[in-house]
Image (cartoon, rainbow, N blue to C red):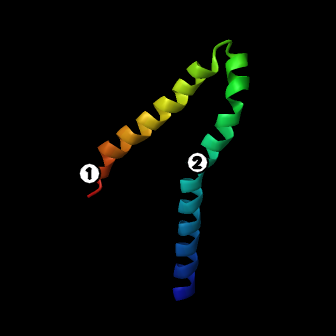
Amino acid sequence: MMEKSGKKRLQIVFILGLLTAIGPFSIDMYLPAFPAIARELNTTVAQVMLSLSSFFIGVSAGQLLYGPLLE
């Protein structure tokens, strides 16, 4: 019985680790694509960078909101 519980716990830790890594990994893939995105959307790289700024503002606002709720 203990072995099944240990395996399940290891799977949960692995899944949580993958979910934690998705954010930074997606940002690392998104940054080099800025020039291509700007070209395709017929805009400037500076305007495309606003999407990254709004992402970080949203993440920080979310942490401010749900952080205290989890205590």
Residue 43 drawn above or below residue 27: above
- Amino acid type assigned to the residue bearing label 1 in the image: Pro
Image quadrant holding the C terminus, namely bottom left
Residues 10 and 54: in front is 54
Residue 4 drawn above or below residue 43: below
Q: Secondary structure at mark 1?
A: helix
Q: Residues within 10 Å of mark 1 (few under 14, many from 20)?
A: few
Residue under the point 42% across and 35% down = 58
Residue 25 drawn above or below residue 54: below
N-terminal of the two: label 2 or label 1?
Answer: 2
Residue under the point 64% across and 43% down = 28
Percent coordinates x, y for residue 30 in the rendering: 65, 36
Residues 60 and 32: in front is 32
Q: Residue furthest front?
A: 46
Residue under the point 67% across and 15% down = 41
- Amino acid type assigned to the residue bearing label 2 in the image: Pro
Corner quadrant of residue 51: top right
As drawn, the label of residue 6 is none
Q: Secondary structure at mark 2?
A: helix
As drawn, the label of residue 68 is 1
Corner quadrant of residue 26: top right
- From the image, tell me which residue sits under label 2: 24
Percent coordinates x, y for residue 13 in the rendering: 54, 68
Percent coordinates x, y for residue 70 in the rendering: 30, 55
